[in-house]
Amino acid sequence: MSLRGLPPADIFDKALGGERRALGRLITFVERDAAEAETVAELAHERAGNAHVIGITGAPGSGKSTLTGQLVKLLGEAGKRAAVLAVDPSSPLTGGAILGDRVRMEDVASPDTFIRSMATRGHQGGLSLAVPGVVRLLDATGYDPIVIETVGVGQVEVDIAGTADTTVVVATPGMGDSVQANKAGLLELADLFVVNKADRPGAKDVRRDLDLMLDLSHVSGQDQRTGMRPEIIMTTALSGEGAPEMWDAIERHRTAITANGQLEARRVNRDIDEVRNRLMADLESRVDLMLAGQSLAGVAEVLDAVAARSLSPTAAATQLAARIKDL
Amino acid sequence: MSDPAPDQARAAWQEAYDATKLRDVPFETMSGVPVEPLYGDGPYPGQYPYTRGLHAAGYRSRLWTMRMFAGFGTAEDTNARFKELLRAGGGGLSTAFDMPTLMGRDSDHDWALGEVGHCGVAVDTLADMEDLFADIDLSSVSTSMTINGPAAMIMAMYIAVGEKTGVERSQLAGTIQNDILKEYQAQKEYIFPPRPSMRIVTDMMKFTSTEMPKWHPISISGYHIREAGSNAAQELAFTLANGFAYVEAAVAAGLDIDDFAPRLSFFFNSHSDFFEEIGKFRAARRIWARWMKERYGAKDPRSMMMKFHTQTAGVSLTAQQAEINIGRVAIQALAGALGGTQSLHTDAYDEAMALPTEDAARIALRTQQIVAHETGVTNVVDPLGGAPFVEWMTDEMERRAEDIFAHLLDIGNDSILEGAYAGIDDGYFVGEIADAAYRFEREVNEGKRIIVGVNEFTEGDSGERNLLRIGAEVEEYQLKRLNDVKQRRDNDAVTRVLTQLKTEAADPEINLMPTMIEAVKTFATEGEIVASLEEVFGTYVEKVFL
Amino acid sequence: MSDASTSDPQIRVVLAKLGFDGHDRGIKIVARILRDAGMEVIFLGLRQSYKNVVNAVEQEDADAVGLSMHNASHMTLAPKMVDALAEAGLEVPVIVGGIVPDEDIDPLMKTGVAAILGPGASAEEVAQTVRDAVAAVRGSSPQA
């Protein structure tokens, strides 16, 4: 019965067969970047590429978990085998995290829905570094769509646009969100805007502001990335009002980007991005090791020279960069 | 009367004091030194804003009511105890319900296993309510019922029992807690989402204001907010804010403030930080008076007079060296008395572990009797009034509460009611409470705060506990009984009335109480009525806020 | 790729309350204690069913389950939770926190509960109890 000691390929087979415990364990491998993770990635990559990946982002308190819950409910009712990744921040001090999004989703989800809570584990940008790998795994094991709910710390959430096929940005009245969205660059990332809490005063103003900003960005040519103008949908997540309209708009977006080739281009870019991110992370840890004097001889001398002011930091970096290939 | 000159105010107090019938006891110290009824100056007791108390003579005229809340087992057990109480001269019945009843679920619900009849009496149908009050003349007693989520059904059952025994609903006297807002904030015994729940509460306020003049449709409770881990200022502020929210809801529903506000009452916790608690009680009266008069435009002084019940802090009781809890309860009871409470429940020392044993409950009652009859604090009205520290603490509690009201008005677009909804929705209340609880726990853990017997002075715990346990027979009996009632009743009638209730629930213009009463008369169960309403109102699921 | 993260695998704990009991002061404090001890807490909170907890453990690949109980129903509910997890083939320790009278401790432990934390347990005790219970199941292999 126990999964312990089974080779990752066997656990993968179990996950393909629908065993959720096995899928849960594989995700842990990916999250920990454990020795098994490479095998898992290999097995998953060749089977992935079918799922529609939807990202939901927005400031804290915008109601995005409730909205995600409503979406999950709809998907369940439509007979889809959906998965949700709910990402919450890790404490920068202790590395611990409290992940509390599952409850509301589980409550409304169909029994086929797979829900996983993830902590950012020290990664900035709204998602955990492991998210692309986990998405691939869910995709490979037949989950479609995959909904990612981001941290929503009100800062840049650029990761999500790199990871999702359709990025939904949630705004609410009374929080200066439209301005916030513009500042944070979310305007360019959004494939779809949702104005949640549409029953509150000011919801129409938010819609008008967004429209205006989209008009401006259209004039300045900023929507060339997708060639489409993002739709704006009004919802009241608490009652579920507007959720079907949101789902329809998400589907329309997918149909459109499938037709115009954007989807394929995004996915290729996404994989390249992942390669790049992993390279950067790898490089960073190697540089750290090098500077700690643990991997290459002669590094300490270079740093000492900087400290003694006989070598500039710029020159030191140039010297060491030439040796990166030796790392 | 709003701002009389000091001399006039003093004279008015004296006049009111002289007109009051006093208890027949010597108002002097143990050594025979006579004491004045009042020291210091205004605002005087019995005068706006009532900081020093609601009545000119304070406890000289009447001691607080020593109300002991208890109840477990079957309806018949509780009924027998009620009758005993009435024979002994008591006129107030206090009813505790078991957990499934409080949650609006029947005794045969999956989760009810092990809970039926445990912390109170199980009420599934009108039949249970009839047993609970069998052979008791409802026109001559006052009944307090501690229930919130399904309060409307329980009140409907009480009305139906009255009707069946020939007592008009206008004759029924009592209080139902019915404070649904604090359920979302602290106690978590909610059923429907906040707004439909509030509709039921206003339906009840409207219904009782026209049909049940002797009934208190709501008791606004900070006790549970404190028990959930809040600090004193949060307890004060959240509770009063909830009070304001009910006022706003009732006014919005078309009621005149002076028609219902005099019947609002409050319920606070008394914890161990002596002066903070006293400051909290005094500030509570002052804030309520001022807001009712200035913000909500009450004219009747009774609308401005905050009456409250106090219970010592269950959360302060320790499992370690449980007997020392008697000391804690005594101090907390004293704080309640010095704060001017209208009634008081003292906790039993063994409650940290389980329901109180009879001995422990007796000791708890004796503890407050000592405060009332031996300490002499009842000889003088507001004996601490005027003391610089006490007045400062009162002002500080008020200031901290006002900060919280300002936040609620801010998130509620200048409405406390909307602020309460917004604060429930965005986790403000639960987040603040959890932060406060964690801060306290950390201080105890780091030894910055000493809890006797827990992190200091820990030797001497006998480890012996004599605990009360409820047998499984109560559960079996109740299940059989519920089953019997379902066999006997007219199921078509049940279906018909529940269908009607659903239709009416969908129309906010209709008051649900009349059909609710019809529903309980068909022996529809509490759980069935709740389930029907859930179809229309939905079920509340708490978002996680930490 | 990087090996540093595998040496000390993050402990993931599911925290829940079963049944009607609404006292959630303790479980919220415990959530923070475990977070501050560096663990990831999957917080389910109030009114959870056995099925919800089993689902969470499966999907979240949790290392332990913490149940908070304050209504004297621990003898009924906790053993059922242990059984439900075992039935689903999940090898995770169940730790009960809250009010458990002394005389119930032995019988409760016999039903398969891994540890019991009473009122007054310090933050360090709470965190260490979870770590020990997880280590006992994981055994020598940190991957478990």
Image (cartoon, coloured by chain):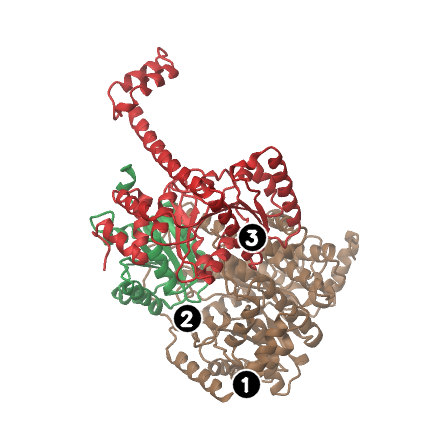
Chain colours: A red, B brown, C green
User: What percent of the width, then of the height, locates residue C25?
Assistant: 45, 56
> Is residue B421 in sight in this rendering?
yes
Give me the C-alpha separation between circle 3 and circle 1: 49 Å
* Residue B265 screen position, x and y as percent: 63, 65
Q: Which residue is mark 3?
A: B234
- Of helix, strand and loop, which one carries label 1? helix
Q: Chain of mark 1?
A: B
Tag 2–tag 1 contact (CB < 8 Å): no
Q: Nearer the viewer, mark 2 or mark 3?
A: 2
Drawn side of residue B327 relative to residue A133, left or right? right
- The first of marks 2 and 3 along the sequence is 2
Q: Residue furthest bottom?
A: B488
Q: Residues within 10 Å of mark 3 (few under 14, many from 20)?
A: many
Q: Chain of mark 3?
A: B
Q: Secondary structure under badge 2?
A: helix
Q: How many marks?
A: 3
Which amino acid type corresponds to the residue marked 1 in the rendered image?
A: Asp
Name the residue: 60% across, 76% down. Answer: B501
Chain letter for mark 2, please: B
Q: Residue B372 in the image: x percent, y percent?
A: 56, 66
Q: For mark 1, does the 10 Å Cα neighbourhood hold few (<14), some (14 to 19), or many (20 or more) residues?
A: few
N-term-proximal mark, 2 vs 1 = 2
Marker disc for residue B111: 2
Secondary structure at numbered mark 3: helix
Q: CA distance from mark 2 to mark 1?
A: 28 Å
**B153 above or below A190?**
below
Query: Which marked residue is nearer to the observer: mark 2 or mark 1?
Result: 1
